[in-house]
Amino acid sequence: MPLAFDSLSHGTVAFGFFNIESDMLLLDRYFFFAGDFCDCVTALAGPAAGGEILRHAYVFDRSGDIGDLMGAIHGVRYTGFIGEVYRKFPFPAEPAGFKQKADGWKTRDIMLGIISHYAVRRDIEIAVTPAAADILIGDYRFSRAGFHELLKYVWRGGYPRWKNGVRPEYVRHMAEAACKSAGALFEGISFSTKAPEPRETERAANGFSDPVAGGKR
């Protein structure tokens, strides 16, 4: 389940996993794979970091093509890209099955086959501003602290968190690189298994109460 996060450029935006069978993430109208995102973060944490290109990303020009996440979860409305994903990978019948799977990368080819009918593939630049005060992910600007919250969401496995507490290797590498980085962008970051606060889950539900997946526009 994506949660609501504060950006400097677009106000409150949605970010996160949206189906437990896939490691694809959404950032408002951007969709990309967690493995690619974590690889970019790992590179940014290196000694020669300045910017990275997030490849294999998709951008929705029409918000209606994204679909209705809550309708798809409840099995009552299958529209757009997310609707087609949930027809292929329905929400688990038992609440205990609602856990993000570490092997979601295995469905990558299926997800690419679906999203190519709805969105445009684009490379997204990830750029760090001077003094690393904030970071740009395409058109979306986040403060350093806001960016840290995105990384900690991925570390947790979002909401509902990783199945059996098992994280993909790329997530572990990302967290290790971020914690060891001498770069100002990662100053003060730490990772834990603390569950999201109740306010976060409430904001997530409110953010997806209408058919458009994403934050404010």
Image: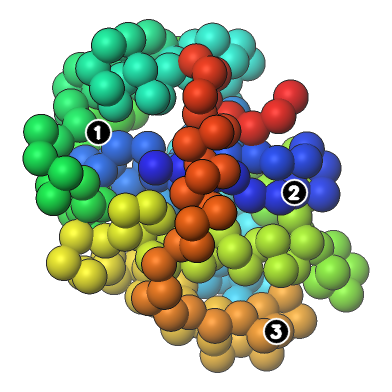
Local crowd size for mark 2, using a 10 Å CA cut-off: few (<14), some (14–19), many (≥20): some
**Which residue is disc 3 drawn over?**
187
Q: From the image, which quarter does the C terminus lie in? A: top right
Q: Amino acid at mark 3?
A: Glu
Query: SS at mark 3?
Result: loop
Q: Is residue 189 left or right of residue 93?
A: right
- The answer to which quarter of the image holds residue 130 is bottom right
Residue picked out by circle 1: 109
Please state which of the two labelled residues, at mark 2 or mark 1, is closer to the viewer. Answer: 2
Q: Is residue 47 at all visible to an observer of this figure?
A: no
Query: Is the Cβ of the residue at disc 2 closer than 8 Å to that at disc 3?
Result: no
Dot 1: within a 10 Å radius of its alpha carbon, few (fewer than 14), some, or many (20 or more) residues? few
Q: Label 2: which residue? A: 7
Image location of residue 76, percent across then percent down? 27, 11
Marks 1 and 3: CB-CB under 8 Å?
Answer: no
Q: Residue at x 53, y 18 (%)?
A: 210
Q: Residue furthest right?
A: 130
Q: How far apart, in angstroms, are the residues tagged by discs 2 and 3? A: 19 Å
Q: Nearer the viewer, residue 100 or 171?
A: 100
Q: Nearer the viewer, residue 70 or 149?
A: 70
- Mark 2 to mark 1: distance in Å? 31 Å
Q: Secondary structure at mark 1?
A: helix
Residue 89 in picture, x, y percent from top left: 18, 28
User: Identity of the amino acid at label 1?
Assistant: Asp
Residue shown at 30% from the left, 37% from the top = 19
For label 2, the SS is loop
Q: Is residue 147 above or below residue 23?
A: below
